[in-house]
Image (spheres, rainbow, N blue to C red):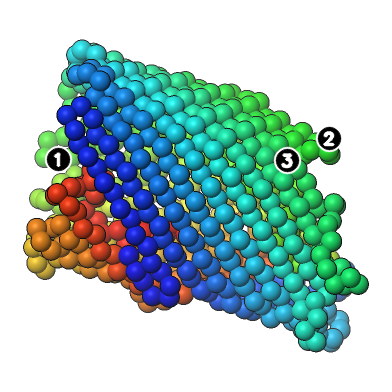
Amino acid sequence: NVGLNDKYGGDFLINYRGTIYTAYMSINYNNWSFSGEGESENRTYNGDTTSYILSRGTSSFRHNPFGLRGGIDLNLSTQNRLSLGGQYSKRSMSRTSNNDHDEWTDPGNIHDIYISQDSSQHSHDFYSLNADYVHHFMPKDHDLSAQVDITRRHSREESWYELVDANNSIFDGQLSSEETPATILRLKFDYTLPFNKNNKFETGYQSRINRSGATYDVYTYDTLVRDYLFNPEYSNTTDYEREIHSLYGLYSGKYGNLGYQGGLRGEYENRKIELIGENAIYPIDHVDYFPTVHVSYQFTGGHQLMASYARRIERARMWWLEPFLTWMDANNVRRGNPALRPENIDSYELGFQTLIGRSSLSIEAYHRITHNKVEQTSILYDDDIILRTVENIGTDYSTGIELMMDLKFLKWWNPNLMLNLYDYRIHGELYEEPIAREDMNWGLRLNNEFKPFENTKIQLNGRYSSPSITAQGERSGFFMTDAAIKQEFFGRRLTATLQVRDLLGSVAHENTTESSDFYSHSSFTRESPVIMLNISYNFNDYKPKRREENNQIEVESIEEY
């Protein structure tokens, strides 16, 4: 694959099928770079005085993922299969930005003009070994499987910022480095017992054990010696331990046109975060239960009515739990919340599906409740400095309807329309202030696939997401269009795909956050359009299963970044 503005990459997969085994190996590398522009306005209030900081500048990003994977599947007998595999990946990411700042207070008319230069580099090494075993009993679909995965990863991050005055002299600066090693072990056992063609029982156990830590060192610029000196006040070492053990049971069956499924999963989590040398330990020890119920009824003519309830969990990201301060730049600091509780989501759904010729229509009404809602928040840390952190703010509610239409009236044109309209409410408390906010949100997605010729596909996709509220402000809406054309040659062995993301350059990210003592607004736009050409060739008529199951042109291959 190759694209404009220094984007390129490639991958290679070889797969060998023997009589009793299948072996594979793959390698991939990509270089993705992006540029962008942004501006921000921060205000802080102190009595009758308001402090302002206006910023505007440019940024550049680079992402270099490399991966190597291999494995072998062994058919030990007609009833036993063993799979062994390994993976190594290395990712490096970098970001640089240059911003012009204008700082002043009101009352007052003295403006402080300066430049900030920021840079960060992040590398991530990942090793993984896995083994899977499956035993097939009689009758068919009576299975026992076991899986073990062990992962070792090591992350390194270095960042710095400098503030430069009109005389090109550094008057403030900071260097920081963070090392984060981690070892993760996962064990999984599953058992399936069919009673007949339509009824079966499933059960299983899973254990996830995580041991990691972080060492964070900070160096502050000293204007007298004109060098960076170690700052023990903001340097820390953290240990992190987490174990999650879960057990589930699920029964599914069918009685006439009525299908049903019911299950329960129990999870025990033990988590401990310790800030070394500070006598600060943050434990969490609790049990959660996650029931699920699903029923469906099949009518004649391709109509189906469905209803379901499920409870699931959303756990915090690792950096959300870090208990120490991390300086993002001279006016923004970040700190995690080691006491953060996971989100529990209750989801109620009622849906109807029908066929209209070759086309399909589905309508779903839903009500979702998120307990212990996690949201990134801001609070005034010091004069002109805003602290970004993460809090459990309370409960949010989403009540809405989702419409999906897959239209196949013409052989050469397949439009797919999705509409989501919902009422969104937040109720809770943040920094001893009550939260009660409500908004009507909606989103629209239209995908068009054209087949003008036998081996040619064209996609034109558009989506819109409306503005939405947060606990302290709002996020702007956005509209985005993507296009792609895919051409196959030589009996579909050679495939060329041209992708264009954000075709109209309409995507912009804006966020507003405010409280009684500060106001913050930021906006950012990334380079557009992003154009990539992907070329693939299959030898010996090899077709990976993942691609056989996905007929869509992959127009979001770099969305991860």
What amino acid type should be assigned to the residue bearing mark 1?
A: Gly
Closest to the observer: 444 or 18?
18
Closest to the observer: 34 or 304?
34
How crowded pointer 3 is (Cα within 10 Å; few <14, some 14-19, many 20+) is rated as many
What amino acid type should be assigned to the residue bearing mark 2?
A: Asn
Closest to the observer: 522 or 223?
223
Q: Disc 1 marks which residue?
A: 302
The x and y percentages for residue 115 are: 72, 79
Q: Which mark is residue 238?
A: 3
How crowded pointer 2 is (Cα within 10 Å; few <14, some 14-19, many 20+) is rated as few
The x and y percentages for residue 390 are: 66, 49
Residue 412 visible at all:
no
Q: Residue at x 32, y 65 (%)?
A: 1
Tell which tag, 2 or 3, sits nearer the viewer: 3
Please state if 139 lies on the left or on the right of 262 as rendered: left
Q: Earlier in the sequence, mark 1 or mark 3?
A: 3
What amino acid type should be assigned to the residue bearing mark 3?
A: Thr
Q: Disc 2 marks which residue?
A: 279
Q: Earlier in the sequence, mark 2 or mark 3?
A: 3
Q: Which mark is residue 434?
A: none
Residue 30 visible at all:
yes
Are the residues flagged by discs 1 and 3 in contact, CB closer than 8 Å?
A: no
Work out which residue is located at the far right of the displayed protein and give it: 224
